[in-house]
Amino acid sequence: DVIDKLKANDTANMITPIDNKITSQAQKKSALDLLSSLLSSFKANASTLSDDTLYQKRSVSGNTDAVSVTALSGSDIQSFSISNTVLAKKSILESGSFLSETATVSSGSGTMSVSVDGSSYDINYTSTTSLLDLKESINTVAGTKVTASILQTGANEYHLVLTSKETGASQNISISDSVGGTLNNELKTYDVSTNPTGTQSIQTASDASFKYNGITITRASNSVDDLIVGVTINLLQDGGSTNIGIAQNTTAISDEIKNLATSYNTLIKQLDDMTLTDLANGKVGIFNGDNTIKAIKREVTKMMTSVDSNGQSLAQYGIGLTEAGVMTFTQSEFDAKMSADPTGLEAFFSGSTNASGEYTEGVFGNLDALLNSYTDSTGLMSTLIDASKKETKSLNTERERSTALLTARYDTMTARFAMYDSIISKLNNQFSSLQQQISAMINADG
């Protein structure tokens, strides 16, 4: 019991302080991981705002159910009118009626030709070729230009339907039989007087047309992407008209600023908590007194409140800090600046090159560079996290060594105690025997 108490006391003096340090390092490591993650998120927002592609994004106004327009990044800011839309159409042929899908299409052999877009596709047939066989052969031979299908319109009424893959006047389909061919009349060209049961055109292929700023435009497709660089006009209905406006997508920019403010406020709140010193209320942050961590907040805040050589600051664009250090974004101030000078806003945010070819980095490019010095693989956070790992490893080694030393000490002490206890027991036995002898002698003399 005495040895156990001594060992517990030495453990408290030697091992417990090391355990406390290991626990503290684990807490610091978790805090550093969190801080690194928050800095990376904030950097991602700054990086996006420093990238000039954000300012090349375009928004389109004026889209309707009849006309839809899309614009790629960097396309010219402009407006135009679209009117008198006429949709391009595909060619559709429908054969006469067959009793079933397995009905034969001929009484003999020959070749059926399907012509479309200047090309002709030959499909051989025999007396055993069924309507279904013919459909599959057409899809195999001419499938890049024509789709063949079978349509059941009623009991014992099956029609072969040919549809061009593309729209445009050049896509009209025609079919013909070889010289001496024996195709059924249902697959020959319809003629009201000689072959009223033959194949007829259900829809004639035609080009799309519309007026662009009053000028008539025709195209083979309902999707026109070669009229304006970076702009696609999609015709959706006949008789449509609209006024289209292509402008800079300011929503994408303001949304990214809002994301930046959220990331900044989350980061600063954690930095404040981690470096807190409030002894009166017993609150102390994990990095209390750590100037390296405190410097992160100072540098980031300094960057956000800086004024460039032209006297510009983020506050002029609706991005400010309250007295409590919370970042705010005022949409109306941003919109006013954006409307008045979009080029100047882009230059301040993302950077610009002057007439002499000299490049000036934007405020978010500078912020991105600062944050990169923290989050890079060789940056501050990586250095701090590696140092924490090394310290934890060193403490664990020290704990193992101290534990082994303490164990050896008390193993030896226990062995000695057992030896001393055995000697004392023997001495006690000898003394008891001697005492008995003395008592016996005294009794004999009496």
Image (cartoon, rainbow, N blue to C red):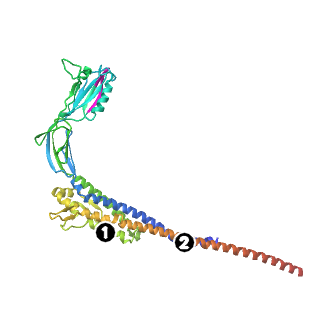
Q: Residue at coordinates 78% horizontally, 77% vertically from top-left?
A: 430
Q: Amino acid at mark 2?
A: Ser
What's the magenta region? 146-159
Q: Give how far across and how far down residue 6 sits, in percent.
A: 60, 73
Residue 446 at least partly seen: no
- Residue 283 picture quarter: bottom left
Of all residues, the one furthest to the bottom in this rendering is 445
Give the quarter of the figure containing the N terminus.
Answer: bottom right
Q: Which residue is mark 2?
A: 402
Q: Quadrant of the C terminus?
A: bottom right
Between 405 and 359, the residue placed more toward the observer is: 359
Q: Position of residue 392 (x, y in %)?
A: 46, 67
**58 or 115, which is in the foreground?**
115
Residue 62 falls in image quadrant: top left
Gap between marks 1 and 2 measured at Cα: 41 Å
Asked if residue 397 can be seen in this view, the reply is yes
Foreground: 292 or 325?
A: 292
Frontmost residue, 334 versus 442: 334
Q: Residue furthest top?
A: 193
Query: The residue tagged with tag 2: helix, strand or loop?
Result: helix
Is 255 situated left or right of 7 in this image?
left
Which numbered disc flags the more N-terminal residue, 1 or 2? 1
Give the number of the mark in front: 1 or 2: 2
Element marked by disc 1 = helix
Say few, some or many: other residues with alpha carbon within 10 Å of mark 1 (under 14 / 14 to 19 / 20 or more). Answer: few
Q: Amino acid at mark 1?
A: Arg
Residue occupied by mark 1? 298
* Extreme residue in the left direction: 214
